[in-house]
Image (cartoon, grey):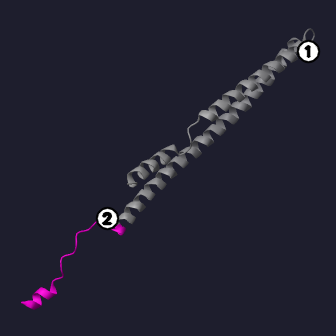
């Protein structure tokens, strides 16, 4: 009878928290999900930036062609009577348009949300949950 008692190991003490292995697994799971989210946001940012670049480039090209055509037409119409006035008005109009666009661009850049904001928000939530 004493041989049977010696063969059974004593009951282990109750665990006092998550094991390091379980904690490392949870940490790797969090890291994996954050990297996946970061990758998706990066893909979205790239496709959005490329689409914007193409649209802006085409808009600039067609806009410049239109401006050149209209300017030439105005100069041809008023060549004999008021060519210097037309050139001055056109230059003032183009300068005003440039200034307006630059101010709008500056406002847009200042008010743009930071890139990867979803990843940063998720990391902040995880940090709050992990902190005691």
Q: Which mark is residue 84?
A: 1
Residue 52 highlighted magenta (yes or no): no
Find residue 129 and report its horizontal and vertical position in percent.
38, 51
- Disc 2 is placed on an element classified as loop
Find residue 108 and report its horizontal and vertical position in percent.
63, 32
Q: Residue furthest left?
A: 1
Find residue 4 and report its horizontal and vertical position in percent.
10, 88
- Disc 1 is placed on an element classified as helix
Q: Nearer the viewer, residue 99 or 84?
A: 99
Q: Are marks 2 and 1 in contact (CB under 8 Å)?
A: no
Q: Is residue 25 above or below residue 81?
A: below
Image quadrant in which the N terminus is located: bottom left
Q: Which mark is residue 18?
A: 2
Residue 17 highlighted magenta (yes or no): yes
The residue shown at (45%, 58%) is 31
Left or right: 97 as drawn, with respect to 119: right
Q: Quadrant of residue 2?
A: bottom left
Q: Quadrant of residue 89?
A: top right
Is the magenta region chiefly helix, strand or loop?
loop
Left or right: 106 as drawn, with respect to 131: right
Q: Earlier in the sequence, mark 2 or mark 1?
A: 2
The residue shown at (11%, 91%) is 3
Q: Which mark is residue 50?
A: none
Q: Nearer the viewer, residue 73 or 107?
A: 107
The residues colored magenta run: 1-21
The residue shown at (70%, 27%) is 103
For label 2, the crowd category at 10 Å Cα-Cα, with few meaning under 14, some 14 to 19 and many 20 or more, is: few
Q: Is residue 71 above or below residue 36?
A: above
């Amino acid at each position: 009878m004493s041989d049977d008692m010696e063969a059974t190991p004593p009951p282990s003490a109750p665990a006092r928290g998550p094991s390091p292995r379980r904690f490392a697994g949870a940490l790797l799971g969090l890291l994996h999900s954050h990297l996946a989210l970061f990758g998706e946001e990066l893909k979205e940012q790239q496709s959005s930036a490329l689409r914007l670049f193409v649209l802006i480039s085409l808009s600039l090209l067609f806009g410049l062609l239109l401006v050149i055509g209209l300017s030439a037409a105005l100069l041809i119409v008023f060549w004999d009577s008021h060519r210097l006035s037309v050139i001055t008005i056109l230059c003032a109009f183009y300068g005003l348009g440039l200034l307006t666009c630059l101010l709008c661009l500056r406002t847009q850049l200042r008010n743009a949300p930071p890139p990867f904001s979803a990843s940063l928000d998720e990391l902040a939530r995880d940090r709050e949950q992990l902190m005691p």
